[in-house]
Every structure is written in C-alpha cells, then in structure tokens.
Amino acid sequence: MVACLQLGFYLASWGMLRGSADLLRRSAKHLVPVIEAIVSSNPSLWEIDVNSYGDTAYTVIFEGANRIRASFPEGASDILVSKIMLGTYGCVPAFDTYFKKGFGVTTFGPKALRKVSGFYRENASIIDSHCVATIDFHSGRETQFKYTRAKVVDMIFFVEGGS
C-alpha cells in the first residue's frame, strides 16, 4: 500500500489528481494493479534511457506502457502512462501538454521516441552534464542515483513548452 501512496502523491504533484480527472475520485488502493503492472514488467525497463533507444528498447517500452495502460479499468492517457514511466523507470519523458508543445510532437509513440533519441545524440554532452545526483529525502545528501537522460530531456521541453 505504501507504493500506491507514493505513486498517488507523485501523480498529484504532476497535476494528475485535479479537476475532472478520474483518479481524483479514487482511493490509493485503485493503484494496486498499476503497481503490479510496474513490478511485473520487463526488468530491462529499469535500464533503458534515451542513449540506448532503438527498436528493441521501443518494443520493451511500449510493452511496459501497454501493461500500465491495461491496469486502469477506465483506460489511461498517454500523459498518465508516460508520467508513470518517467517517475518509476525514468526511461521516457512525460508526454504532457508542455512537453509535447515544446518538443513539437502530438503522441507518445516510436516516432516521437526516435525524435527524442535524435535530439539526445545532437546534444549528448550537454544533457549528460545535467544528469546530476538525486537527493536523499532523509539526510538531504546526494545519492548514488542520477537523473536519467529522459528526465533531463523532459525538463528541457517542459520549460520550452510552458514559455
């Protein structure tokens, strides 16, 4: 149940529990199938980042996305699925309104991920330099974990799309 609460608060922080959103009317227990889909997905999803995109990675990413989407009986948008994947695996940007506007794409699909891969290749050194360490919640110190390249790309185009 702790994982459901963590996922729920993460989604709330991204604005996914507001207005007419279906998740707003659900309890955290509603996320149990989503957590099960996340933990039962292909373990290689935890290793995929934009520098390793390719046909095999795209297959694994969209199999995982389909598992997550199917875990919501009422269905799940590309925005919701990609935000969950960014927040858990860190393998894709969140295809929300600002990201799509800033990056110039309309859907979360292989074509868009190929474009993300191309952007990364053209800007790899800059993006890699911004993969900074995350901060431990309790101690406030840096951890051994770094932001993924997908998260850095997400931040770039979230800002670009919001301006």
Image: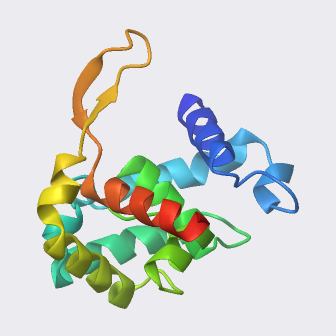
Name which quarter of the figure residue 52 lies in.
bottom left
Count of numbered circles in the view: 0
81 on left or right of 136? right
Instruction: Tell which of 33 and 11 is nearer to you.
Output: 11
Residue 70 seen in render: no
Q: Looking at the picture, how far across and down is residue 71, in whole percent? A: 58, 63
Instruction: Tell which of 128 and 65 is nearer to you.
Output: 128
**Residue 139 sits above or below residue 28 on the image:** above
Q: Looking at the picture, how far across and down is residue 112, in whole percent? A: 38, 84
Q: Residue at x 38, y 14 (%)?
A: 140
Q: Residue at x 81, y 53 (%)?
A: 18
Q: Residue at x 23, y 45 (%)?
A: 131
Residue 150 seen in render: yes
Q: Looking at the picture, how far across and down is residue 53, in whole percent? A: 19, 74
**Residue 114 sits above or below residue 65 on the image:** below
33 on left or right of 89? right
Name which quarter of the figure residue 127 lies in.
bottom left
Q: Looking at the picture, how far across and down is residue 27, in whole percent? A: 78, 42
Task: Return the residue found at the far front.
Answer: 163
